[in-house]
Amino acid sequence: MDKLLNYIMTALYGDTEMDNDRKEIIRYGLELTIMKIIFTACAFGIALLLGEPISYLLFTAVFIPVRSLAGGYHASTHAHCFIESMGVVVLVCALMKLFDLNSAVFTVAGLVFAAVSAVVLWIISPVEHENRPLPFDKKKKFKKQVRVYILIFSAVLITLFVLNLTRFALPIETALTVSAVLALLGLKKNHAAI
C-alpha cells in the first residue's frame, strides 16, 4: 500500500513543496479512498459469486446512511474492519439463500428484528466513538436524521409487504439489525470505558 500511495502522491504533486501535515492528510485520504474501492469491489464480488448482488445493493443502500449517522462500534484496524465487513456481506447473502428455503420463518423473524432494531436506533442513536465525539448540536441533528431514515425505510418495508415482495425486505431488515447491533456494541464499549 505504501508503494502505491507514494506513486500516487508523486504523480499528483511531483516535487511541489508541501508541509508534512498537509501531505499526511492527503495521503491518509488517498489511503481511505483506495481501501473503500477495494472493499466495494470485494464485497460486490462476493455478492456476485453468491448470486445476491441485488440483496447486497439493497442492504448497502440502507446500511450506509443509517450506520453513518447511528454510530457505534468500529473495528480497531482497517484489516479487522475489512474482515468483519466481508463477514457481514456473506451473512446477508447466506440469509437470502436461507430465505429461499423457508420464507415464512424469515419473513416473521426479519420483521421482528427490524422492529426491535428500529426502536433501539430511535432511542440510542447517535452513539459516539472515541475518534468521533459529537457536540450537542450534531447529536441532535444526527438523531433527527436517523429517525427520518427509520421512518422512510419502515415505509419501504410496509410497501414491500403490501406488494408481496418480502424477499426484498430481508436485506433492509438485516441492515437495520446490523446497524442496531453495532450501535449497541459501541454503547457498551463507551460505558465500559467510563
Image (spheres, helix red, strand yellow):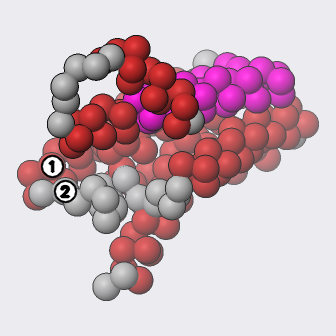
Q: Which mark is residue 138?
A: 1
Which residue appears at 10% of the width and 58% of the height?
136
Which residue appears at 27% of the width and 35% of the height?
23
Q: Is residue 70 above or below residue 163?
A: below
Q: Residue furthest left?
A: 137
The kind of secondary structure the magenta stretch mainly shows is: helix
Q: Which mark is residue 129?
A: none
Q: What percent of the width, then of the height, locates residue 12?
A: 34, 15
Q: Which residues are magenta?
A: 30-59
Amino acid bearing label 1 = Lys
The C terminus, quarter of image: bottom left
Q: What percent of the width, then of the height, locates residue 176?
A: 51, 45
Q: Is disc 1 in contact with disc 2, using a CB cutoff of under 8 Å?
A: yes
> Which residue bears the numbered disc 2?
134
Which residue appears at 43% of the width and 74% of the height?
189
- Density class for disc 1 (Cα within 10 Å; few <14, some 14-19, many ≥20) is few
Occupied quadrant, residue 42: top right
The N terminus, quarter of image: top right
Q: What percent of the width, then of the height, locates residue 155?
A: 43, 30
